Amino acid sequence: MMDIRTVAFILCSLLEISRTHGAALKCGGALAEPKGEFFSPNYPDPYPVSINCTWTIQSTGNRIVELTFPFMQLEYVNWDADCRFDSISVYDGPASEHRLLGKLCGNETRPINSTRNELTVVFTSDSTFPKKGFHANYSFVGERKSNIPLTQGKALKYVPFLSELVTPSPELKDVKCGGEWTVSEGGFTSPCGVCLFMVHSLFSSEDVKCGGEWTVSEGGFTSPNYPHHYPNKAHCTWTIKSTGNRIVELTFPTVELESDWMKDCRFDSIKVFDGPASEQRLIGLLCGTQTGNFTSTRNELTVVFSSDSSTSHPGFKAQYRFVDVPSLSEYPTPVPTNDTEETSKCGSVMVEPKGEFFSPNYPEPYPNHAKCTWSIQSAGDHLIELDFPFMLVEYRQWDGDCRFDAVSVYDGPLADDKLLNRLCGNHTAISVKSTKNEMTVVFTSDSTFSYKGFHAHYSFADKP
């Protein structure tokens, strides 16, 4: 028969197992109180790995849900804007098939409001690096309203938004409200808040002329109706083509589009492509109030503006000009060389806790047609930190892809693994960190100009 100490030990062991294995932990639930809170499993201790928790919050009547996070600490890597490791996803409705309002990770604690009386929160973690987790508060607030602004503009149409009508009190049962307006400007009132309205533009993408082809040396264009609100479901394409071999400089001094919590511009957006069509390389993506400057690498540039079926804003203004291809005057005079990769051995496998390596011939110019691979392998589960005390590699100021000579850093033992960074020019303030215990560095040079090259330093680091 077991004594009391043995029983206590078994109970404590079972409790510890339940705290550290997601399968034994309950998480998620249905919340219907006017306000409340919920937490990641084990909070404030680290949440378990490989977990998936769903909370549904449903208000009474037409009240919307306001969600805040007094504390959040989830796994985050500074190059991962998509929160692909551990994350909280918030959906505008009773299930994760509804519109995504926000996806959070790291220590992002911004508030999120639903547009209806239900909200869904999904927390997921991967198989590595659990953190403290999160504390969430919610409350039911206000009556839901149309979020489309009443604007003064051309040919606006006002129609009742029947799904959001508030039932009149008995004394108002005979009140007439609603209607349709097609004049260029005007207004209306609502008796005691009985009727709510949604505003729709009569214009569709077919009604508005937008896009075009530009071949003059400088000019500009705007979103449809600018500075008034652009229409819904618009799709406009501008192609800009210079004469000769001049490249295109494009500037957006003013941008006011629908904002996107995810920062990937999935609603209304401006896309800039490096070439004559939208199948070319994407070099710019704008939404919200982001402005930007873009330069082509050839004599053509394509701009595509698109809007969805919901909220619209004043839009954007763009300006462009043709400029001569930049020279390499920012660098020392390059040294042509006939060296090939056969004449300069390079690359190696490194397993020491720290070390350094160099481009071939460093500090003399590296050869043309070089291709060098360094494989860095740490012991155990250590990560790898890489920095560059010196770098001077061929670069053009209009070449954001380092397509001439480059240092490419991969997160794993092969060049087929995830690309962590691709460097050229004089990037010496860059530090690159792996997410696993191996890293691959590949240096390539083309058949033209060569420079001093680079000095790289690495060290093993503990996992966070």
Image (spheres, rainbow, N blue to C red):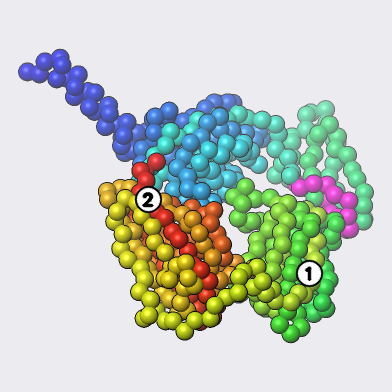
Tag 1 near tag 2, CB within 8 Å: no
Residue 149 lies within the magenta run: yes
Q: Which residue is mark 2?
A: 459
Looking at the rendering, in which quadrant would you find the C terminus? top left
Give the amino acid type for the residue marked by disc 1 in the picture: Tyr
Which structural element holds mark 2? strand
Task: Give residue 110's quadrant in the image.
Answer: top right
Tell me the mark number nearer the camera, choosing from 1 and 2.
2
Residue 108 lies within the magenta run: no
Looking at the rendering, in which quadrant would you find the N terminus? top left
Name which residue lies at 50% across and 78% down. Answer: 446
Residue 282 at what x, y percent from top left? 61, 68
Query: How far apart are the alpha carbons under marks 1 and 2?
Result: 46 Å
**First to last magenta residue range:** 148-161
Find the residue positioned furthest to the front: 364
Q: Is residue 358 above or below residue 429?
A: below
Q: Which residue is mark 1?
A: 320
Q: Is residue 249 above or below residue 309?
A: below
Q: Nearer the viewer, residue 255 or 123?
A: 255
Q: Nearer the viewer, residue 376 or 354?
A: 354
Find the residue positioned furthest to the left: 1
| Residue 268 visible in this rendered orientation of the protein | no
**Marks 1 and 2, the one that precedes in the sequence:** 1
Give the amino acid type for the residue marked by disc 2 in the picture: Ser
Residue 238 at what x, y percent from top left? 75, 72
Name which residue lies at 80% across and 50% down. Answer: 199
Residue 21 at what x, y percent from top left? 30, 37
